[in-house]
Amino acid sequence: MGLQFKDLITTKKEISIENLKGKVLAVDAMNILYQFLTTIRGPGGEVLTDKNGVVTSHLLGLFFRTTSLMEEGLKLAFVFDGTPPEIKRRTWEKRTEMKKIASLKLKEAVEEGKLEEIKKYAARTSVLTKAMIEDAKNVIASLGLPIVQAPSEGEAQTAYMVKKGVAYASVSQDYDNLIFGCPRLIRNLSIEGRKKKTGTLGYQKVNPELLLLEEILNELHLTLDQLIHLAVLIGTDYNPGGIKGIGPKKALKLLKEYGTDYERLFKEVKWSETFPDLDWRLVSKTITEIPVTDNYELTWKKCDKNEVFELLVQKHNFSEERVKNRLEKIQEMQEQNQQKGLQNFFRK
């Protein structure tokens, strides 16, 4: 969804990777793959590909960031989207239209030689295909990491896993997990400590940050139910764009004014004029009743070096030396952990 909560939330805690060592983190896989696909690009804004023209930008980011985090002792579990709610088709239609517009602007930027515009609009045309997702799943599995298949929205499933206590936090750049009731959300999870500046060629320094839902609700003086309706006002994946003229701060003011009298609130903002064929109750119900599952196993296995090598080096032409070096570090780390486990066993 990419909820516009940034200006509302100030209770963010900067944390270090060291703080997360040994903790289980439920990663919103689609979010992170799109992040790599849009930011890892060539000098002209083009996606990276192998010798056969197959896109590899997402695999490059996935492999090197994931293995870096594994080296630091983080226990990652990747959660993938399932079947989206029927109501989400509106979002698909809007995004398809936006990609068409971005493609036209990209063509103009190329013709005029405007490099920053080329990179900006190239990123907006990104498409994550089924084949690309399967490639990513194969890499994750070969690294020995668990994959959780959500019945519907991945971020709802990660939120559920954190609520149950099987994961410490959800990992995503988006704030969407919060409206699904996620107690802990981690953003900017990266060893490098930097991220791409939106629409530019540069980077900015960042540190991982931890958001606690309870603290956010206390800061805003809202309940989770009110936060959900605030999100509906400003726009979710199920009602893109929200009500025109209502941003996060105005929506917060309205929630404080109307409390839980949602009938009067949505009548006041003239919801039916913006969304004549969509009931606001359906949007909030979709969020609160999104399907989740307990049908998964969180088991971390030994990295299959041969399989990783075959997938990345032989199939997609990754640097043999870089992949080999990274795999050797992972193997060394896993052997050390195994030895520690044996020592602890015999001490008992």
Image (cartoon, rainbow, N blue to C red):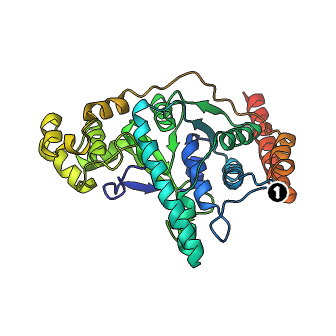
- 259 left or right, relative to 325: left
In front here: 342 or 63? 63
At 32% from the left and 59% from the top, the residue drawn is 7
Rendering coords of residue 162 (x, y %): 48, 34
Q: Looking at this view, is 25 or 196 the one in front?
A: 196
Position of residue 27 relative to residue 317, above or below, is above
Q: Quadrant of residue 22?
A: top right
Q: Which residue is at the front of the view, 225 or 92? A: 92
Instruction: Please identify the residue farthest to the bottom as the structure is shown.
Output: 113
Q: Circle 1 sits on which residue?
A: 51
Spot occupied by residue 330 in the image (x, y as percentages of width and height) = 78, 47
Q: Quadrant of residue 311?
A: top right
Q: Position of residue 166 (x, y in %)?
A: 54, 30
Report if residue 114 is visible in the image. no
Query: What's the amino acid at mark 1?
Result: Lys
Q: Is residue 78 left or right of residue 300?
A: left
Q: Residues within 10 Å of mark 1 (few under 14, many from 20)?
A: few
Q: Is residue 269 left or right of residue 117?
A: left
State how many labels appear: 1
192 vs 210: above or below? below
SS for tag 1?
A: loop
Looking at the image, can residue 101 be seen? yes
Q: Position of residue 118 (x, y in %)?
A: 57, 70
Task: Give the quadrant of the C terminus.
Answer: top right
Residue furthest to the top in view is 295
